[in-house]
Amino acid sequence: MQYLMLIYHAEAETSKRSAAEMNALHKDYFKFTQEITDSGHYIGGNPLQPTPTATTVRVRDSKPVVTDGPFAETKEQLGGYYLVEAKDLDEALGIAARIPGARFGSIEVRPVAAINRAALA
Amino acid sequence: MDLEKLHREESGRILSTLIGLLGDFDLAEEMLQEAYATALQKWPTDGVPANPRAWLISTARNRAIDRLRRERRFDTKREEIARHAELISPAVADSDYSALSASAADSAEEMFPDDRLRLIFTCCHPALPTEAQVALTLQTVCGVTTEEISRAFLVPLATMAQRLVRAKRKIRDAGIPYRVPSQEDLRDRLEVVLLVVYLIFNEGYLASSGDALIRRELCAEAIRLGRVLCQLLPRQPEAQALLGLMLLHDSRRDARVSSDGELILLEEQDRGLWHREQIEEGTRLTESALRSGAAGAYAVQASIAALHANAKTPQETDWRQIAGLYDILLRDNPSPIIEVNRAVAVGMGRSLEEGLALLDDLEKRGVLSDFHLLPVARADLLRRLGRNAEAAEAYRQALGLATNDVERRFLRRMLATLAS
């Protein structure tokens, strides 16, 4: 199964970190990504620019409506993601717990819905 | 053969095997229902098979394979499941099972593993909300109907049904595995399972509204679950301790409520009505858990219950030791409720004044201010000290906080006794 791991963190807190701290965190992420790549779990993943760069689009009455900011104001913000292959939720949760951001933020683990493409054709 | 009785006693085990074979809760449940329907038709004329459980599993499984084969054109995964189910146990026709001798039926039975542990750990997966863990365990492992569960927990039937559907959907769609956790995770996962069992027991033991019969059944189901856990997971002291604790509490079931449904205080209960065998078994389990050297919170609580249960008269209760056990509980799980219980034990074991001082201190700290337990405990110690006016005041305070009818009636009775 594929699982999307959404990494949430408090941007306000993260922005207070020193350059040395951020550097150490990046190293941890690099190491973790390498590990799950070697173990065959990694499919994809990226950090995201912070929410001030977010733009939300809705189409209403066939017209796109563009607004500044993320879809929802929350205490913790989406800061990045991994897409992994795992045999079941337990394995996925084990991987999620090793994401460096889990130590101070939260990881939401969501199974990717399988779509029967043949049925759509 | 009483099919309903068979369902209650065996459905958890049968369903656990079927889910293991078919990898799908809904399909397993549906096929088991069909197998029951077939049994209802056939058994009265063909006779009851030598091993009804193996017959039901086999019949349900054959139905499932038929169904999956019919649907395979649409879904290759279903074909895989069907092949898997066939591989694990070669097909035996329904009719063959009735003809099997008892020994052949027993060996047929060995083909079907007892998967209840896998089922329990899946129902109690931490990715499911606690209330769903409880409901799902009752429904699948214990064979309690959705309707009965909704009545026991005073939740509308539609809400309870929805809760169960959501939980099963999450198990399937989120890929919650059907598996006993690995040794390294077992401790944490077992803790969740034990809590679910204890919640089921407490719902039956403490809830005062709702159907008395169903509540008693919940206690019985929790004890059965406790036994299954002890049998399938030997050498788990906390599982033993929890079973011991439940047996010790439940041993008083006939003495703690009067014929008109009123609560009877521990010290006023007719100890002759306590179930001795259950007390002995509970005490043995508790001692065994304590001897393991890894005693946790259930073992300590069970020890307290054993001290109460083994006192021949209220006066012989070893309150000092009980207070000491509450100290241990408090050290590991700080909680104001345990502090209240400890204060009462100190009051009974050392001096009423000392216990009262501890309760007053709790009141000053403002903890539990919206819970009737604290004023009830104060009222009790004040009453024993002969400070009746203050006791009455505390009972009135408790009455303002208690929500449960049986408890409110009890508090009014205590007030009336003080006034007379």
Image (spheres, grey):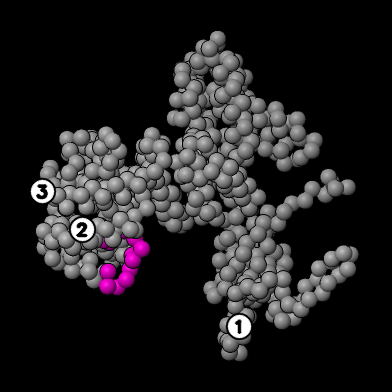
- Kind of residue sitting beneath label 3: Glu
From where the camera sits, is residue B239 visible? Answer: no
Mark 1 secondary-structure assignment: helix
- Kind of residue sitting beneath label 1: Ala
**Which residue corresponds to mark 2?**
B392
- Can you tell which mark lies on residue B316? 3
Q: Which of pointers 3 and 2 lies earlier in the amino acid sequence? A: 3
Mark 3 secondary-structure assignment: helix
- Kind of residue sitting beneath label 2: Ala
Q: Nearer the viewer, mark 1 or mark 2?
A: 2
Q: Chain of mark 1?
A: A
Q: What segment is highlighted magenta in the picture?
A: B363-377
Image coordinates for residue B327, horizontal then vertical, percent: 23, 63
Q: In the image, is residue B381 above or below residue B242?
A: below
Q: CA distance from mark 1 to mark 2?
A: 54 Å
Q: Chain of mark 2?
A: B
Whether B134 is among the magenta residues is no
Q: Nearer the viewer, residue B231 or B140?
A: B140
Circle 1 Cα neighbour tier, 10 Å, few/some/many (<14 / 14–19 / ≥20) = few
Q: Nearer the viewer, residue B158 or A95?
A: B158
Q: CA distance from mark 3 to mark 2?
A: 28 Å
Q: In the image, is residue A77 above or below residue A21?
A: above
Dots 1, 2 in contact, CB < 8 A: no
- Can you tell which mark lies on residue A12? 1
Circle 3 Cα neighbour tier, 10 Å, few/some/many (<14 / 14–19 / ≥20) = few
Q: Nearer the viewer, residue B286 or B181?
A: B286
